[in-house]
Amino acid sequence: MQKKLLTQIRNEWRSNLWLALELLVVSVVMWYIVDLLYCRVATYLEPRGFDTEHCYLLTMRELTDKSPDYHPYASGKEVRNDILELVERLRRRPGVEAVSLSQNSYPYNGSNGNGRISYDTLVSPEAICRLVTPDFMRVFRYQGARGETPEQLAEVLKRGEFLASENLYLNKHFDIKQLTGKDGFHLFGDTTMSYRLGAVLQDVRYCDYEEGRFCRSFAYNLEELARYNPGYINTDNELCLRVTPQEDHDFIARLKADSEGQLRVGNIYLSDVRSFADIRRSYQQGYSNQLRNYLVGMGFLMLNIFLGLLGTFWFRTQQRRGEIALHKVHGATSRAVFSRLLGEGMLLLLIVTPLALLVDYVLASAELNAWRGGTTLQAGRLLACAGVSFLLIALMITVGICIPARKAMRVQPAEALHDE
């Protein structure tokens, strides 16, 4: 059967050449679409390294001297103590699991503090500096690279040690977990102070649309810094908390109802409460719109490819009604005729697939497709996307041949030959 198909394809090489060129172009374009979609989806589905479900961001403010309840602070220590007292009151509320203070640290933030970490001759690229109180690990449920729980990570910060993400020295091809428990690290550009790496964090992504491997970060205890400089704890800090799922209903309304009476300490009061579901949605609106536009564009392009192939094979099959009638006159069954037509289309696709794969490889080597994992060319990714492209085109060919072929085989052979 395959030998007969090859002979027929060779005999009709002029028409088949144009069809093969069309399939080659379509295969490359389809691979590009599938590869781009794969990169976007795979990045979105990566572990985020944190959990914002049932979490809230509270905004603190300080009364001005125009308020009748205003009492001037004598020093920064009084501000710090009032804020810490507010944190304790929130922590004692029913259903509250953990409360934390931080600077430029909560997820979906967009505001960063940056710095490098050096150890001997190892110097990291710019990394996000997260100054947080220990309970920040529990609020957002950070996980250690060696299986440490949020509670264990919080204990590391309480000891005055720092945490670093697993990808900190990825550009040096060095596994930072080997340095866990070692002293001699320099943070904040200060080479006079030495810090100990208490644990290594799983990669913490900046948002759902950025790869974790590029989101380098480290965390240090904000309370340690506030012991020497009380100004580190102030009303500009991020006040975040996590509540139990059972209490996460009308939480904002209930908290605002108590904010004036129970949750005002000195001049410090709560001015706003936002859920992280809203924060996530607002921060990623631009990314979501871009992804939606990508999907609409790719869907439109795939629809055009589908209609083009469908029309090509539909017309090709319709033009061969006389050939189908001859096969049936000579005793061929409808199934045999259909298998022959479909086999011809699939054989043409198989012939051009190696050439299409070669073109895909050249495009990926030239970095003309999407980036992921620091590269555009990965053997597994190239083969997987090419395989998906092959299956999609094979499906289009099947539909383009199946429908007109079934209609043609319902026509009586004598009628079809008479029309010819």
Image: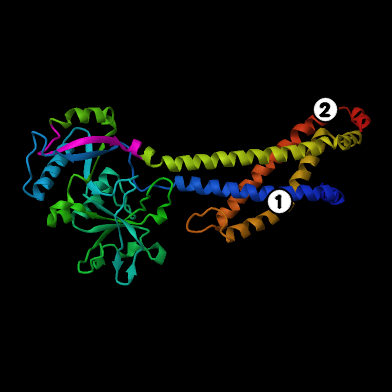
Which residue, as the protein is rendered here, is positioned at the far bottom?
121
> Which of the 4 image quadrants contains residue 287?
top left
Residue where numbered disc 1 is placed: 24
> Which of the 4 image quadrants contains residue 157?
bottom left
- In percent of width and height, residue 47 lies at 40, 47
Q: Are marks 1 and 2 in contact (CB under 8 Å)?
A: no
**Amino acid type indicated by mark 2:** Arg
Decide if residue 209 is on the left or right side of residue 384. Answer: left
Which residue occupies the foreground of this view, 178 or 169? Answer: 169
Residue where numbered disc 2 is placed: 410
Q: Is residue 53 above or below residue 189?
A: above
In terms of secondary structure, where does tag 2 sit?
A: helix
Which residue occupies the foreground of this view, 330 or 33? Answer: 33
Which residue occupies the foreground of this view, 156 or 278? Answer: 278
**Over which residues does the magenta segment extend?**
262-279
> Which of the 4 image quadrants contains residue 65?
top left
**How would you rate the neighbour count of disc 1 (Cα within 10 Å): few for under 14, some for 14-19, many for 20 or more?**
many
- In percent of width and height, residue 227 lies at 13, 55
The residue located at (22%, 64%) in the rendering is 195
**Residue 198 visible in the snapshot:** yes
The colour scheme of the drawn protein is rainbow
